[in-house]
Amino acid sequence: MRAWTGLVAIAFAAAELLAQGGSTLPRLVAAELGSTPWNVAQAGGIAAYDVRLDESGAVASAEIVQDVAPYGTMLGDALPAWRFEPAREGGNGVTSRVLVLGFFRPPGIDFAAPESPRYKGTVAPDEIPWPTAVVPPAYPSNAVGSGKVVLEVDISDRGAVTGTRVLTAATPFDASSSAAVRQWKFRPAWRANREVASRAFFVFSFVGVTP
């Protein structure tokens, strides 16, 4: 049973979508998200998928890399409906693999980060980047209640975050999400026996206390 409802359209300029040559990374065009906050569990965490995209940008498969119940299932149920502009080589769509990661912040304003987070022991496929140092987003002082932010994250061949873009409509949680992920470090993706730049897509979920 699908856990999310509603479609969040993410529009880009036509010039960005139509590569005339060279290589481009995939872009998220539309993501299915729900209005209900993900607060069915008192503990948060990271759920992540290795998502394979076909030449048209459709999701061909989504293999779970790290689960945190029940969020991993919720994210996995939603992914087949996501739509991407495909990676391109010489202007032609090509298959690709991307990391889709959900960071599910525990309910409340403050929380204690685990001393030994699971992601440090997770073995992810070489073809996608994987975090080696994570900074949780702060709950913004100007926010109330819950919210979700979808981010496009560019990662260099050295594992550094080189760019972020908020893809969803503006919320009070945007700046906190972007500031946090810019401090993350990654084991870079590998392709053809070398480290390469890559693009990932993050969902940050906040659950706060409504006065």
Image: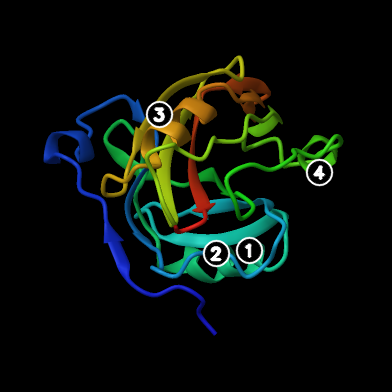
Earlier residue among tags 2 and 1: 2
Alpha-carbon span between mark 2 and mark 1: 8 Å
Looking at the image, the residue that sits furthest to the front is 211
**As displayed, is residue 46 above or below residue 4?**
above
Alpha-carbon span between mark 1 and mark 3: 23 Å
Looking at the image, the residue that sits furthest to the left is 14
Q: Nearer the viewer, residue 86 or 165?
A: 165
Mark 3 lies on a secondary structure that is: strand
Q: Amino acid at mark 1?
A: Tyr
- The mark found on residue 38 in the picture is 2
Q: Amino acid at mark 4?
A: Arg
Query: In the image, what residue occupies the spot 46% across and 36% down?
Result: 177
Mark 1 lies on a secondary structure that is: helix
Say few, some or many: other residues with alpha carbon within 10 Å of mark 2 (under 14 / 14 to 19 / 20 or more).
Answer: many
- Viewer-nearest of labels 4 and 2? 2
Q: Write down the residue under mark 3.
A: 164
Mark 4 lies on a secondary structure that is: helix
